[in-house]
Amino acid sequence: MSKIAIVFHSGYGHTQRMAQAVAEGAAGELITIDADGNLTEAQWATLAAADAIIFGSPTYMGSVSWQFKKFADASSKPWFTQVWKDKIAAGFTNSATMNGDKLSTLHYMFTLSQQHSMIWVGTGLMPSNAKAANRNDVNYVGSFSGAMAQSPSDASPAEMLPGDLETAKLFGARVAAVAARFNK
């Protein structure tokens, strides 16, 4: 079984709830970036030992949170020694609006993974884009690059839609399946 780490920052709890769904699908370990953008040495060691790293951040102002960016900048130490080279990578995000420039956030994570010489995995999920589709369907937001969710600005994490959480769970399962095939 592959070791999967889900490293994420969550400002209000929505991205944390999404991370939990990703971890459930991937049977992975959650690593929370703290409010100051830091990880412990033990958390860095977990990332070094992982076969796959799934990145998560809310989309703020069209990109990752500053806490996630601080983590990404701090990853220059493992970058220098290419500790994450050839690990599977993936990413997820959440924002209050349907678009909210979430793709920019995923592109940031993709670029980070490529700097580390990682191998990116997308959702592998078809979008729910027919007339009969409803907001609770899997991949309603329609992302291929990574998992996306939308949570209204006045909704609590408990009010996240089951379709978005199921998308995150299926995404985690796909990353785990790819990691297992890649790490035979």
Image (cartoon, grey):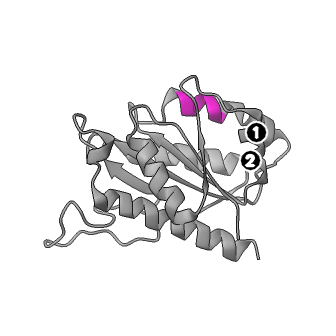
Q: Is residue 122 visible?
A: no
Query: In the image, what residue type sits under mark 1?
Result: Ala
Using the image as rendered, state which of residue 104 and residue 168 is in the foreground: 168
- Identify the residue shown where x is 75% and y is 60%: 86
SS of the residue under disc 1 = helix
> In the depicted view, which residue is nearer to us: 60 or 101?
60
Q: Is residue 173 visible in this depiction of the protein? A: yes
Give the farthest residue toward the right. Answer: 81
Relative to 154, say whether 116 is above or below: below
For this view, does 89 lie left or right of residue 163? right
- Return the x and y of residue 76 as percentages of the image width and height: 75, 35
The part of the chain drawn in magenta is 67-72
Q: Residue furthest top?
A: 36
Confirm whether the magenta stretch covers residue 42: no
* Picture quarter with the N terminus: bottom right
Q: In percent of the image, x 71 and y 40: which residue is there?
A: 43
Quarter of the picture containing the C terminus is bottom right
Element carrying mark 2: helix
Q: Are marks 1 and 2 in contact (CB under 8 Å)?
A: yes
178 is higher (above) or lower (below) than 111: below
What residue would you read off at disc 1?
Answer: 42
Residue in view at x 43 percent, y 39 percent: 58
Neighbourhood count class around disc 1 (C-alpha, 10 Å): few under 14, some 14–19, many 20 upward: few
Residue drawn where x is 48% and y is 52% of the image: 20
- For disc 2, the marked residue is 46
Tell me the kind of residue under disc 2.
Thr
Give the spatial CA distance, label 1 vs label 2: 6 Å
* Image location of residue 136, percent across then percent down: 23, 62
Q: Which mark is residue 184?
A: none
